[in-house]
Image (cartoon, helix red, strand yellow):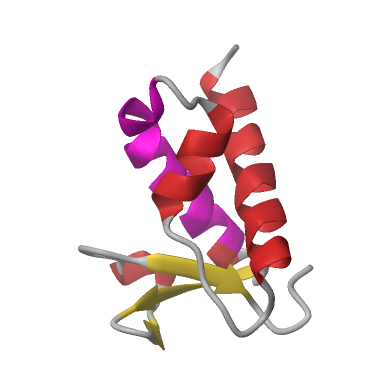
Amino acid sequence: MTETDLRAELQEAILTLAAERGPAKSICPSEAAKAVRPDDWNRLMGLTRQAAIQLARAGRIDILRKGKPVDPEAVKGVIRLRLAAGGE
């Protein structure tokens, strides 16, 4: 599987998990990584963040830091992800 394929799979996992959680709730990026590769998820965390940033740039999700949306170009530290309004 190529990195592009893996990133697409991670994006799908992010969107699916966020939709299941609901619009007022968020997910941890590790949940998406664990959904894609349960036995090797921690190695995917950098790629998972990249996938989330791409989705945020496209307006599909919000990246949250301390409960508030952050610019996808300035993502640092611990983050959470939720569907953007109309992002599904």
Residue furthest to the top in view is 1
Figure label count:
0
Q: Nearer the viewer, residue 45 or 34?
A: 34
Q: Quadrant of residue 2?
A: top right
Question: Is residue 50 in view?
Answer: no
Magenta-drawn stretch contains 56: no
Image-based side of 70 in relation to 23, left or right = left
Q: Quadrant of residue 12?
A: top right
Residue positioned 42% across, 59% down in the render: 28
Image-based side of 20 in relation to 80, left or right = right
Q: Position of residue 1 (x, y in %)?
A: 60, 12
Residue positioned 64% across, 55% down in the render: 17
User: Does residue 66 sit above or below 43 in this rendering?
Assistant: below
**Magenta-drawn stretch, dominant element (helix, strand or loop):** helix
What are the residue bounds of the magenta stretch?
A: 40-55
User: Does residue 86 sit above or below 80 in this rendering?
Assistant: below
Q: Position of residue 18 (x, y in %)?
A: 63, 63
Residue positioned 57% across, 30% down in the render: 36
Q: Position of residue 20 (x, y in %)?
A: 71, 62
Q: Position of residue 76 (x, y in %)?
A: 23, 64
